[in-house]
Amino acid sequence: MELEEVNTVAVLGAGNMGHGIAEVAALAGYDVAMRDIKDEFVQDGYDKIEWSLGKLAESDQISEQDADDALDRVTPLVDLEETVADADVVIEAVPEKMEIKEDTWTDVEAYAPDHAIFTTNTSSLSITDLSEFTDRPEAFCGMHFFNPPIRMDLVEVISGEHTDTETLDLVEALAEDFGKTPVRVRKDVPGFIVNRILVPLMNEAAWLVDDGVATIEEVDATTKFDIGLPMGSFELSDYVGIDVGYHVLDYMHEVAGDRYEPAPMMVEKVENEEFGQKSGKGFYDYEDGEGADVPMDDDLFSETVKERLLAVLANEVAYLVGDDVASPEEIDTAVKLGGRWPKGPAKFADEYGVARLAEALEAAHEESGHPRYEAFDHLAEFAEAGGFYDDDGAEDDGAPSFDTLELTYPGEKVAQIELSRPQQMNSISLELIEELDDAIDVVDEDDSVRALLLTGAGSKAFSAGADFMSIAGSGADPFEAVELSKYGQETFGRLEEIEMPVVAAIDGYCLGGGMELATCADVRVASTRAEFGQPEFDLGLLPGWGGTQRLQRIVGMGRAKEIIFTAERFPADEMERFGFVNEVYEPDEFEDAAVEYAEKLAGGPPLAQRFAKRAMLKGWDDSDAGLEIESMGFGHVVNSEDVHEGINAFFGDDEPEFEGK
């Protein structure tokens, strides 16, 4: 079966995951039959879809008509036979109990058409075992969405031992059509990719406290602000639900051995029904205490904690890569999307040093004797090789590789730098600034490029601002903050100085540091769903990457103060009236229109553009200096081949083809 033949999707289960998956499928244009075992359950799921679609329309992420159409495509049902009778793809999202899933799939097999593809949204159970409850294990695979499905981009597509490649290809294509990023898991291993990384990491954090190596406060401060993960380990456990992590871990312990033995304090929390935020108390107290208030205090950072956590992480990556479950790139993509990490676990391990982490793991095993520190066979291989990534092969064409950016060439004489951290709303980290600096070098040195297009990956954000967690990861040092501000100012400012037109194409949020970056472009175009703002005052901060200076030169001092002092958000049409945005497009035409705009500017006379940018930039500070550059530039180009080409084309009623000569 080809993707074009898929019209109807059956979703089994109307709980948090089920109704979320149903909503995603309906928004993608599929007819959805959503089923649960009771009318009240399925109606509750349907009501939540209606509420969610309303919120998306209210925030202009979709139109009201799109919301109505999507809801019309969802049919809530209780009768299983009716639900799957016309299904092309079945997505099962019933509770994570093997006996419930067995009963479900046995019944589905009896009613579903022969051509239907079967998928399960399990987060940990064996795909192979589940597939054997059906008569078509070759047409069965995992399709693991992340919560909430409407917002999380990742879908793990997991092969069972019997799964056909054609089934995996179709389900990947379906996930992409849902607007998600599929990552293939080539072998049916406990935890797949994301949980295989996150759950042992949370368990190791608990063991470190149980063993007296560190306190909860020290582990979370180290995890969040020294390593630079979005949440502390215990903070994450409370957020996800300690019981949720425990059940995945317990299954891994059962099928993969004692290296996944749950830490005593995790077992105790589950037994006491202290599950985290949802129960009011977990590792932190959310009722009578302040919750997970992790201090940014470098006195709490522990190198032992950092090394142990990263060593456990590296060991799991070594297993996944060495056993051909997934590549380092696939693992990093999955964990960045599924865990909202600023960089992937393979990259974290490589930067710290896989050999150092292998030694730390061995030392911890000798000290404790616990199986969780036993190295997988492949770890030594990667330690000897120098890491998980092949740096020698990363730059075969001599060009730098980027982790936070994409450099492409979407149109004639146009280069595009895309901020590529969609899982973090393209927030700006120190690494991104460094890579932007390098990418500008590449573009600046390429004589074939005449215009630069600056974009953000995905439709949610051009950039939602600075990534405070990664930037402040080692503590808030005032002197380092000053240097960071200057570095950002200078790097962003290079867009003003580069001698070609720069177009910022803004879709979604353009806030804080993201708006400061866009301010440095020569021209800004936006989609109707774009939102702008400088929210720093709400955080007790002020813009630090040029916002206090550049914004007022574009919209005037009064408007700039309004935007900065109120910290409010402004829609694209209002920013167009302010003079900040040059053109506003509908979302469905935005991408093509932005490239066309850049191509139009790329067709201009390079020499004249170069001197005009120089004169205008210098004239901001000193009008006499700007006028001097203008005069010199005029004299330089007046007898150029470009001018002759322009004059001949004008009188010949042709389009000029400027060569920059």
Image (cartoon, rainbow, N blue to C red):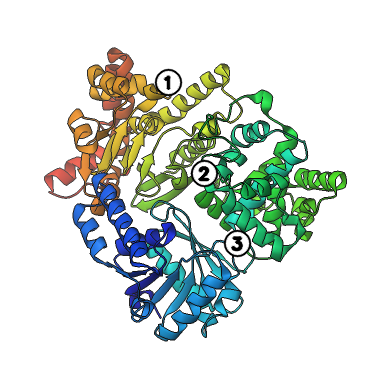
87 vs 259: above or below: below
Residue depicted at x 29% and y 28%: 568
Sequence-wise, the earlier of marks 3 and 1 is: 3
Which quadrant, please, contains the N terminus? bottom left
Which corner quadrant of the image does residue 21 belong to?
bottom left
Q: Is residue 70 left or right of residue 516?
A: left
Q: CA distance from mark 2 to mark 1?
A: 34 Å
Q: Residues within 10 Å of mark 2 (few under 14, many from 20)?
A: some
Rendered location of residue 525, percent (x, y): 26, 40
Q: Residues within 10 Å of mark 3 (few under 14, many from 20)?
A: many
Rendered location of residue 47, percent (x, y): 29, 57
User: Tag 2, which secondary structure?
Assistant: helix
User: Tag 3, which secondary structure?
Assistant: loop
Rendered location of residue 216, percent (x, y): 66, 35
Q: Which mark is residue 541?
A: 1
Sequence-wise, the earlier of marks 2 and 1 is: 2
Nearer to us in this view, 599 or 606: 599
Which corner quadrant of the image does residue 478 belong to?
top right
Q: Amino acid at mark 1?
A: Leu
Q: Which mark is residue 279?
A: 2
